[in-house]
């Protein structure tokens, strides 16, 4: 333990002086860590989806075999995963569960509803006390598959699915405050869509990406132009079949799609639309081997990240990010205890990637992990703008930063990496009372202008 502390002290001295991008030295430095207990669900957890509310609290939805495959939503309260409302709140089995948080912070779930005899779509929301239907339960024209839920910029819930009431083709509906109504024509795709992913562009237009059975099972992306659903670039633009399509937008509004690429040995490929064509982001088929359950998301600083079930690393979870030139591992490849099913990737408000999945290494129950360290994000440093004094300190320290104070905050962690204080920074010099802290070594992590800086302090 002493050796570890001395190593940390030495490394943080280097950070304070040089501020160089040296973010991958040791698994002790950076690691994927469980959020709460691994395997926290009561039973097998199927169809996991992860989302954060506006306050930065992670939520997950899944159907739990311990509750007859009904829907459960849990949130992490800082210590453990707790139920949001009743466990098993759906009328019957809930398949293809998907979760989104409204702008006001209310969790919504959409799913294929086995409580309806035709397996139609149902959306429910938590009103603070109970889970209630949004409009009618089973509102779709027929049975549905591959439900995907998202909110418009104005706060309306939209749901996309493969529509058994319209030849299995794609349909998108929105809730207008009273009823669910079609967005454009129902059944607008050329053929059956598999693994539909619904997302809104920064300008507010709904897009869907899917494996397109009307185009040789290749990837297709369509957008609603206010009147009709139209192709974004060519339909079926991928090199081969595109499984587990996942759609996300960068900050400038360009759509990106990730998938298991049968045109490149079933490896991971990410493509973006440049306004004219779909082009590869880095190399096509960049993963070590076959992938499953690809999930794409952008970090707050604008980098695309991809999570997947990694056949090249013992069928365990791997996350990679695009550094502007190539795809590189985020932490260790194959970091999960066992094979991750239904993997879902999302970012916390502080920029940490989280993944949720059905965990084969923990009896197929739900597990959430995050990429964490006492100096998370140190690779983004350029020139130090943080000053911390006095050091050593007895009762108070001053945190001084030359960057903007808007949306800046600090976190103090102890030598074990446990958070002991956090607060927003509202002025260039912030006085912090540490008189109640036990004597020892602490780390102050300041996030400022999307730059993360860390300094070591000693409390006498």
Image (cartoon, grey):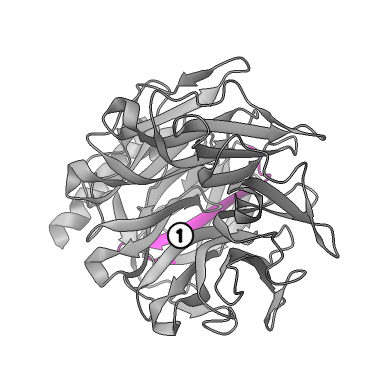
Q: Residue furthest front?
A: 167
- Residue 282: x %, y % from top left: 38, 22
The number of callouts visible is 1
Q: Is residue 413 magenta?
A: yes
Write the residue at 44% across / 83% down.
67
- Residue 43: x %, y % from top left: 35, 79
Write the residue at 47% across / 40% down.
245
Q: Label 1: few (<14), some or many (≥20) within 10 Å?
A: many
117 w.r.t. 368: above or below: below
352 w.r.t. 126: above or below: above
Q: Is residue 328 magenta?
A: no
183 w.r.t. 94: above or below: above
In which quadrant of the rendered view does residue 137 lie? Answer: bottom right
Camera-side residue of 9 and 265 = 265
- Residue 196: x %, y % from top left: 54, 46
Q: Quadrant of the N terminus?
A: bottom left
Write the residue at 69% across / 83% down.
129
- Residue 140: x %, y % from top left: 69, 60
443 w.r.t. 227: above or below: below
Callout 1 secondary element:
strand
Q: Position of 288 compared to 421: left or right?
A: left
Q: Which residues are magenta?
A: 404-419
Camera-side residue of 238 and 285 = 238
Q: Position of 7 compared to 260: left or right?
A: left
Q: Name the residue beneath numbered marker 1.
A: 412
């Amino acid at each position: 333990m002493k050796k570890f502390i001395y190593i940390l002290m030495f490394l943080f001295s280097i950070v304070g002086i040089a501020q160089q991008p040296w973010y991958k030295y040791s698994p002790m430095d950076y690691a994927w860590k469980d959020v709460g207990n691994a395997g926290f669900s009561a039973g097998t957890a199927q169809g996991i989806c992860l989302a954060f509310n506006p306050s930065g609290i992670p939520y997950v939805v899944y159907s739990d075999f311990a509750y007859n495959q009904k829907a459960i939503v849990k949130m992490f309260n800082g210590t453990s995963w707790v139920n949001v409302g009743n466990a098993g709140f759906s009328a019957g089995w809930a398949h293809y569960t998907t979760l989104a948080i409204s702008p006001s912070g209310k969790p919504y779930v959409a799913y294929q509803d086995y409580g309806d005899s035709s397996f139609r779509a149902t959306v429910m929301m938590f009103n603070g006390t109970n889970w209630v239907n949004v409009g009618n339960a089973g509102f779709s024209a027929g049975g549905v598959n591959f439900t995907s839920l998202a909110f418009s910029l104005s706060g309306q819930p939209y749901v996309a699915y493969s529509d058994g009431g319209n030849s299995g083709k794609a349909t998108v509906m929105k809730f207008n405050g009273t009823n669910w109504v079609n967005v454009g024509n129902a059944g607008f795709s050329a053929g059956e869509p598999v693994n539909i992913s619904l997302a809104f562009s920064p300008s507010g237009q709904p897009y869907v990406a899917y494996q397109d059975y009307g185009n040789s099972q290749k990837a297709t992306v369509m957008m609603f132009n206010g009147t009709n659903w139209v192709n974004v670039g060519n339909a079926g633009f991928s090199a081969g079949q595109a499984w587990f399509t996942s759609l996300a937008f960068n900050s400038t509004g360009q759509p990106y799609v990730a998938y298991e690429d049968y045109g490149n040995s079933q490896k991971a490929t990410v493509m973006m639309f440049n306004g004219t064509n779909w082009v590869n982001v880095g190399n096509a088929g960049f993963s070590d081997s076959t992938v499953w359950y690809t999930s794409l998301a952008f970090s707050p600083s604008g980098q695309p990240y991809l999570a997947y079930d990694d056949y090249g690393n013992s069928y365990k979870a791997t996350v990679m990010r695009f550094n502007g030139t190539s795809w590189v591992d985020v932490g260790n490849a194959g970091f999960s205890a066992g094979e991750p099913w239904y993997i879902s990737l999302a970012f916390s408000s502080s920029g940490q990637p989280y993944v949720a999945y059905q965990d084969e290494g923990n009896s197929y129950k739900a597990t959430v992990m995050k990429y964490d360290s006492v100096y998370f994000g140190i690779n983004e440093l350029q020139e130090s703008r943080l000053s911390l004094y006095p050091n050593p300190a007895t009762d108070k320290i001053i945190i001084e930063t030359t960057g903007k104070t808007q949306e800046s905050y600090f976190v103090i962690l102890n030598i074990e990496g446990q958070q002991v204080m956090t607060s927003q920074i509202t002025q260039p010099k912030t006085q912090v009372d540490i008189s109640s802290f036990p004597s020892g070594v602490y780390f102050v992590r300041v996030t400022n202008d999307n730059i993360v800086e860390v300094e070591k302090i000693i409390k006498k």
